[in-house]
Amino acid sequence: MRVAIGSDVKGTVLKNHLKTHLESLGYDVTDVTQDKELDFFDGATNVSQSILNKEADRGIIIDEYGVGSSIVVNKYKGIICANVADEHSAEMTVHHNNSSIITLGSGIVGRKLAEKICEAFVSADYDGGRHQIRVDMVNKMC
């Protein structure tokens, strides 16, 4: 699985840690925000473009709280993103919402929890079925 990862300046340390962690688990991780001075808008846009251009299968964005990035990402047609702070939400947003991107707050979650959140997210599969009706409704909104 190919994962695009990005951050703003306040998420850089956690982003770098998660990139190394996911690579150690065998994931192909691309950092789309190597410039440390980027705003959360830039990080969210770069990760979203990676998903839309099919350069990555999943995306992870880290800023201080995760909310701003999530708002930006959810403006892109065809992408569903969730701001998560626990493993269960990271897994269930894929199972039920077919989310391709999650956002994390570096001021909210620590390294170990962030690792578990990302592991749950990248290993989850979309359930489809009855959930597809809602996913289609969300995608029609854009």
Image: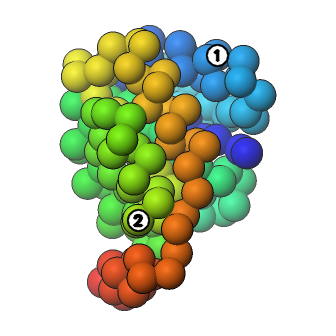
Comparing 87 with 107, the one in front is 87
Secondary structure under the numbered disc 2 in the rendered image: helix
Q: Residue at x 28, y 33 (%)?
A: 85
Q: Is residue 132 above or below residue 97?
A: below
Tell whether 27 sits left or right of 90.
right
Which quarter of the figure has residue 41? top left
Which quarter of the figure has residue 13? top left
The nearer-to-camera label among 2 and 1 is 2
Kind of residue at badge 2:
His
Tag 2 residue: 96
Tag 1 residue: 20
Comparing 40 with 120, the one in front is 120
Rendered location of residue 131, percent (x, y):
41, 77
Secondary structure under the numbered disc 1 in the rendered image: helix
Which quarter of the figure has residue 109? top left
Rendered location of residue 4, percent (x, y):
60, 41
Kind of residue at badge 1:
Thr
Residue 119 in view (yes/no): yes
Disc 1 residue crowd, few under 14, some 14–19, many 20+, Cα 10 Å:
few
Residue 64 in view (yes/no): no
Rendered location of residue 91, percent (x, y):
44, 47
Numbered mark located on residue 114 in the image: none
Disc 2 residue crowd, few under 14, some 14–19, many 20+, Cα 10 Å:
some
Tell whether 80 sits left or right of 122.
left
Spatial separation of the CA atoms under disc 2 and disc 1: 28 Å
Q: Is residue 126 above or below residue 67?
A: below
Rendered location of residue 22, percent (x, y):
64, 25
Q: Is residue 136 above or below residue 69?
A: below
Q: Residue at x 50, y 33 (%)?
A: 118
Q: Residue at x 55, y 32 (%)?
A: 119
Work out which quarter of the rendered image holds the N terminus and state it: top right
